[in-house]
């Protein structure tokens, strides 16, 4: 894994939304920004940081394109930009939603158009391919949004989709399979393709989540969630070690947005649409039954944001008080940042963030603080720990904002609809 001071991919250096970075600002007031730079268009992708370079994506209304950009961390000036694909049409979304990944020598960009490309740190194109041409329509209702995972020199991409597209050509006469792909970062060569079977129906096939690495004993696993189940895979072959089905009733609208996360030897996942949180021990085999669960947290969680693991606790930012699971929940009166003890699955604390609204981003943990942002662009900073004391609020008024806040090298990077903003003490 990369050094903690960089933020090399969507969920950071530890793949759980946290970093050991310190010396970060307590307030995110845009009036105190070190710099702020206008972006060509909107994007929901998280900024990726390696030393003095910040990598971001953007739509480009002028050319109807999808852009990869490199910004100077010191002053916000654009070092280079490359047009890598054509914008797609998707409700409430855009093609610049997947976050890039980097190993400090190369940076890899994936777009909702299926365009996947690797560039060197100076913006020279090394290789490119289009996953739609190679594997058919990506077939998700709100536009393909999974971020690639870079792990030990391999780029992992999940395509959990409907067998029949909503619109556009399927690319094949046969039903579309859900896939997990492994691609060599150096060459762009596909190392393996795993067909991930599912008993899901209709929209429940679809996952906007991303592959997550699990490095605890007894083995390394690739965690994949969507299509009514969570599964663990061999990163060398894609073969499935185990799976747990969480939708035996076959609800048809259980598309999934949050990714799973690991806590020590636990795999933690949330059910779709703000449903319960589940935990099970890593290292399973075959089809797992509900009895394999270590614990279940039954309150409303999040329909959108992926859980954060920070300083031994799990943090969940609820996304919308109208999530289906809110009925009868003690959380139905607003938006809360939940604090869960991973040892027991019990709630250790909670902080009321807002009376309502949409909160689609995933929380970031750094420097003893939790950073969260609303879709409207309000940033709230909360003291880490069970007490949940709010430290500051700031309004960027630049929505829709769905990117995770990035912490790297003593700075925060906040991507809103039209700007990239850098803050530091």
Image (cartoon, grey):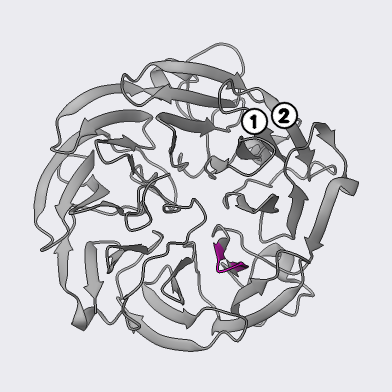
How many angstroms separate mark 1 from mark 2 (CA)?
Answer: 5 Å
As displayed, is residue 177 above or below residue 418? above
Q: Is residue 345 left or right of residue 292?
A: left
Say which quadrant the C terminus sits in. bottom left
Bin the neighbour count of mark 1 within 10 Å (Cα to Cα): few under 14, some 14-19, many 20 and up: many
- What span is in magenta? 309-315
Q: Is residue 342 left or right of residue 374?
A: right
- The location of residue 200, given as percent across then percent down, is 73, 34
Judged by its main secondary structure, the magenta piece is strand
- Does the magenta-highlighted stretch encompass residue 371? no
As displayed, is residue 205 above or below residue 126? below
Where residue 234 sits, quadrant-wise, is: top right
Contact, mark 1 vs mark 2 (Cβ under 8 Å): yes
- What residue did someone put label 2 on? 241
- The location of residue 208, given as percent across then percent down, is 53, 44
Q: Is residue 176 visible?
A: no
- What residue did someone put label 1 on? 233
Residue at image position (45%, 43%) is 145
Residue at image position (49%, 62%) is 362
Residue at image position (52%, 55%) is 16
Q: Identify the element where label 2 is drawn.
A: strand
As displayed, is residue 149 above or below residue 389? above
Bin the neighbour count of mark 2 within 10 Å (Cα to Cα): few under 14, some 14-19, many 20 and up: some
- The location of residue 23, given as percent across then percent down, is 31, 76
Say which quadrant the N terminus sits in. top left
Q: Earlier in the sequence, mark 1 or mark 2?
A: 1
């Amino acid at each position: 894994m990369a050094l903690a001071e960089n933020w090399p991919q969507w969920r950071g250096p530890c793949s759980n939304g946290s970093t050991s970075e310190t010396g970060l600002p307590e307030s995110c007031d845009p009036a105190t920004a070190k710099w702020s730079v206008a972006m060509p268009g909107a994007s929901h992708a998280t900024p990726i940081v390696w030393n003095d370079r910040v990598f971001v994506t953007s739509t480009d209304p002028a050319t109807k394109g999808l852009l990869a950009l490199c910004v100077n961390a010191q002053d916000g000036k654009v070092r280079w930009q490359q047009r890598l694909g054509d914008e797609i049409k998707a409700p409430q979304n855009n093609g610049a939603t997947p976050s890039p990944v980097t190993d400090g020598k190369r940076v890899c960009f994936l777009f909702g158009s299926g365009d996947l490309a690797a560039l060197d740190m100076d913006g020279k194109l090394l290789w490119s391919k289009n996953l739609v041409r190679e594997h058919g329509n990506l077939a998700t209702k709100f536009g393909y949004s999974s971020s690639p995972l870079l792990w030990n020199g391999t780029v992992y991409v999940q395509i959990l989709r409907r067998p029949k597209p909503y619109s556009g050509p399927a690319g094949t006469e046969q039903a579309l399979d859900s896939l997990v792909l492994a691609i060599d970062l150096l060459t762009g060569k596909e190392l393996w393709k795993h067909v991930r079977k599912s008993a899901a129906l209709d929209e429940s096939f679809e996952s906007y989540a991303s592959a997550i690495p699990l490095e605890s004993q007894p083995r390394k696993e690739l965690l994949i969630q969507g299509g009514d189940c969570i599964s663990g895979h061999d990163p060398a072959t894609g073969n499935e070690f185990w799976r747990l089905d969480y939708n035996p009733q076959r609800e048809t609208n259980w598309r999934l947005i949050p990714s799973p996360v690991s806590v020590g030897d636990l795999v933690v996942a949330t059910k779709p649409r703000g449903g319960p949180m589940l935990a099970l021990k890593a290292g399973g085999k075959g089809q797992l039954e509900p009895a394999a669960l270590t614990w279940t947290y039954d309150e409303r969680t999040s329909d959108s944001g992926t859980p954060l693991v920070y300083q031994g606790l799990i943090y969940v930012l609820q996304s919308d008080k109208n999530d289906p699971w809110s009925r009868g929940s003690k959380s139905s009166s607003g938006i809360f940042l939940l604090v869960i003890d991973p040892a027991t699955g019990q709630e250790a604390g909670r902080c009321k963030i807002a009376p309502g609204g949409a909160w689609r981003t995933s929380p970031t943990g750094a420097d003893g603080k939790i950073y969260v942002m609303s879709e409207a662009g309000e940033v709230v900073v909360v003291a880490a720990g069970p007490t949940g004391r709010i430290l500051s609020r700031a309004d960027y008024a630049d929505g829709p904002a769905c990117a995770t806040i990035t912490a790297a090298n003593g700075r925060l990077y906040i991507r809103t609809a039209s700007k990239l903003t850098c803050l530091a003490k």
